Amino acid sequence: MDRTARLRQILEHARNHPVYAHKLEGIDLGTITPETIAQLPLTTREEWIAYMRANPYPPAGSALVHLTPSPALGWMPEYLSQDDLEYQSQALAAHFGRLGVAGKRVLVAFSYHVFAGGWLFHEALQKAGAVVFPHGPGEAERIAQLVQVYGFEVLVCNPSFALKIAQAGGRFGLLLAGGEPFTSVPGYREKLEQAIGGVALDAYGTSELGIVAGEDLHKNGLLEAQEMAILEVLDPETLKPTPDGEKGELVVTALSRTLMPMIRFRTGDLAIAVRENGRVRLPRGVFGRTDLMVKVKGVKLYPTELAPILGAFGIDPRGGAQLVVESKEGGTDKLTLRIKAEAVPPMLGEALQRATGIKLDEIVADPTLEGPPLIDRRFSKNP
């Protein structure tokens, strides 16, 4: 597939779309390439929400509609044309083909109703040469029984449900997982692979974008699915590309959407990019959100990036942790992590330092912990 030609096709559709018509005015779109895409303006989810609120009906040319829960809208629609669907299935078939699914029996346990879920995988897996069974979610015991009877070799579902299937006796040579934090959680892959008896690979996507990155069999991070998307990682403050190995916001241009173009879409997701031979790799996957940020000891810290590590130590990151930043005498920063637990798990501090590059001054266990995820007392912002 010619990425530049496909990108320009997307941009021509975007030129006439209400979200982009003004933003792209005066830009010679015929000169834009994946390498020069930073010349285009960024797009936010808020812009799309405003448009969808004013235009809820599927536009002309729609062939398929998916819905995703949205706090702002109730449901966030996704529209695809017949051409979009054909392109998406071919593009993802190329990705799945590289994982060796041709000739394999595949059971898909993502939902086929309302959400994009199973649809993102199903037709592409068929085009890649797999035999596909659209089971849908739930019934872990039944799936384990079906595996034994029909010899399914590949499982497609979220990692937590894969564990339930394994506990019911299901074994697979390959798991294609997504939809939840997975490889960003230390030790999770190893636990899951031991349970299913095979290889577990991660993928990243959203309903607006489709699947835009996934692991290969080397398991060294999420790789840009070049047929599906152009990935960037930008500093959320400066909106400039981050140096390799530095945290930033994942920005995606989808190559599979003409009816609902996603041009330099700010996902709000936190990632680290390594750029290799014109391809972006996310070695730690997607591991947090950029909604909150604090600069501590000269390093940018996003409280949500702690979530995968905390989860690996049995601490619920949703309300189970709080970062407190204060000033020591002399003006240096003091960073304390409070966790909702009876005791501080051994090695937690070391694991957090490896992941963030910041040494915590103190970790305090408090089983009654309540309050916001971040308190910064250095400038009297919080009591």
Image (spheres, rainbow, N blue to C red):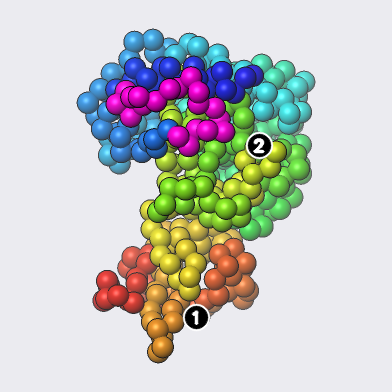
Q: Amino acid at mark 1?
A: Glu
Q: From this viewpoint, which residue is outermost toward the left?
A: 54
Q: Is residue 367 magenta?
A: no
Q: Quadrant of residue 356?
A: bottom right
Measuring from the top left, give residue 137's x and y in whole percent: 53, 33
Q: Is residue 152 above or below residue 172?
A: above
Q: CA distance from mark 1 to mark 2?
A: 42 Å
Please report the residue visible at 44 percent of the width from the left and 82 percent of the height from the top: 332
Crowding near the residue tagged with mark 2, few <14, some 14–19, many ≥20 C-alpha atoms within 10 Å:
few
Image side of residue 48 versus residue 195, left or right: left
**Number of callouts in the render?**
2
Q: Amino acid at mark 2?
A: Gly
Measuring from the top left, give residue 194's x and y in whole percent: 74, 50
Residue 184 appears in the rendering = no
Q: Secondary structure at mark 1?
A: strand
Query: In front: mark 1 or mark 2?
Result: 2
Q: Which residue is mark 1?
A: 362
Residue 278: which numbered mark, if any?
A: 2
